[in-house]
Image: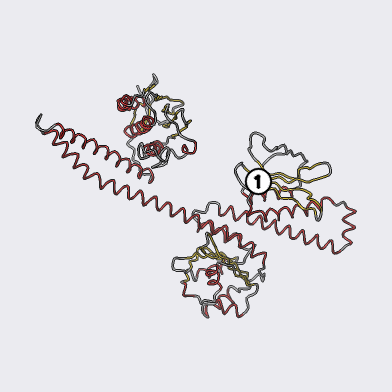
Amino acid sequence: MSVQSPAPPETFARIARLACALLDAPAALLFEFGDDGHGLLASHGVDAEWREGADGDGLHPVATVPIAGGDGPPVGSLVVLDRPGRDEPADQRALLEELAALAAVELAWRRRDADSRTAQAANGELLRREREARAAAEQAERRAAFLAEVGMVLDDALDYETAFRKLVQLTIPRLADYCLIDEMEADGGTRRIARAHVDTEKQKVLWDRVRHPPEADPDHHPVMKVIGRGQSVLVGECTDEVIDTIAHDAAHRVILTEVLKLHSFMIVPLVARGRVLGLITLAFSDSGRRYGPAELSLAEEMARRAALAIDNARLYGQAQQAVRAREGVLAVVGHDLRNPLASILLNTSTVLELSAPGALDPWVADSLRQTIALVEQSNRLIEDLLDVSRVANGGITLIRARHDLRDLAARAERMLRPLAEDRGLALEVALPGEPVPVHVDGDRVLQVLSNVVGNALKFTPAGGRIGVVVESANGVARVTVRDTGIGIAADELEHVFDPFRQVGDADRRGVGLGLPIARGIVEAHGGRISASSEPGVGSVFSFTLPPEAAPSFS
């Protein structure tokens, strides 16, 4: 597909922008069909030379809506572009069709010459229909623009109460004279979390009743109907009977009729996963406007998006709470286990050290040494668990000092070489001739080296090689660890730094804490750690330590 056309009119460019905002897509195109092919009316996000499949942008059509030409064939099309992997957004199809209808009206006016428009103006019925079509198209444009603004307000809605305070301001005066949002509580009552009124003085009245327990409203109250059925309520005109139904008492009736001057209202449920999470109340008062099906449809679409925002925020909060609870348990268990293990280690070591040569049977001495080794291994695991908790809570303490990174790498080599030789692996460490000054917590950097190189030792078969390279460029120190191990599959690589993750479901070489801890320590220093791998060839882990303003090494 190629596009070539002169600069598009502003109306068509605005339609393309609205389509992008509506679908959260990067680009959109509007085409006009003619006898000699098709031409570009407007584009947003791509230039006029865009071709499907061209290198560079990777965009392709995810939605194509024809621009109807009355009873005949389509006169054009609206095409929305996005990255590969995104399906056509079926739930937004109707809104795209409304934008296409607006484009159809504009094309109809564009195609008529002055003589044909004069002739058609004589036909009052045809002119009336065209005006109605234009009005409907403009209404569709306003609807799409409003929903695009709603989407932007709710985009970052983990703090949904703040987002909802912005949302109610967005509704006035275009959709309401005043707007309320109430959240469902565990007891079945509601709690007001946002409100707005075109009159700031009257807005204060909307806070008079912040909470409504379930028993505060009779069964026939519209709010209870919405909560119970999960369906919207629309009242086009508030009669005395309606006021009697919704007024809690005489004072509330005065507020509704004399202060707020309620004229027409809608109550729309916030429904997600089959549960009513809250309510949006929209009301006309002093303006004298009335609600109808079009306004209800728009309000329900707004409520659908708002409900997803609440649900996502709650799920995120529950996940964060679960993570905090898990880390708390790890911290408590870790601290509670270290005391008895310390006693076991002390008593076992004391027996070995104070026993006269030959006083213990060989098997007893071996058992005691194995006990010491197991206790030390358990202590390392406990310390790893505590470190994971510290990383998750941002609580890693660093005791920084001036070090030469070459010395730290050499110390790590001395610790790990016996293990490498025991496993039949070649460990090669390349150090530069000049110092690599860093201002770091030396013990923690040693822990990073031990974890990263140790991970390579675990996953490299006998006869393999592990290379460690220390270098410095532009003041940034870098350590690269390269192995000839089994490698990591692409779908596993993105999770390689996640706690408790293993390479493959059945692999139990470790508990999956070394690399997450290494990342936490490196990032606490202000550095970065990364990984790349090719299954069957090996893996490469690299981390940096940023430059530090410190006196140079002599």
Give the residue drawn at x 74%, y 39%. 3
The outermost residue toward the top is 433
Quarter of the figure with the C terminus: top left
Looking at the rendered structure, the kind of residue marked 1 is Val
Q: Nearer the viewer, residue 516 or 73?
A: 73
Residue 152 placement, left or right of 402: right
Residue at which label 1 appears: 62
Q: Residue at x 77, y 58 (%)?
A: 134
Q: In the figure, 293 relative to 45: above or below?
A: below
Give the colouring mode of the picture. Answer: secondary structure
Q: Is residue 387 left or right of residue 180?
A: left
Position of residue 493 measured from the top left corner of the image (x, y, whole percent): 47, 37
Up/down of 448 relative to 12, above or below: above
Count residues near mark 1 (Cα–Cα under 10 Å), then give few for <14, some for 14-19, many for 20+. Answer: some
Q: Quadrant of residue 42?
A: top right
Question: Residue 13 location, x and y as percent?
Answer: 72, 47
Residue 292 image offset from top left, x and y in percent? 67, 68
Given residues 281 and 485, the one toward you in this image is: 485
Vertical arrangement, residue 480 with respect to residue 76, above or below: above
Q: Regarding mark 1 in the picture, which secondary structure is present there?
A: strand
Q: Position of residue 60 (x, y in %)?
A: 66, 41
All told, the count of numbered labels is: 1
In the rendered image, the quadrant that contains the N terminus is top right
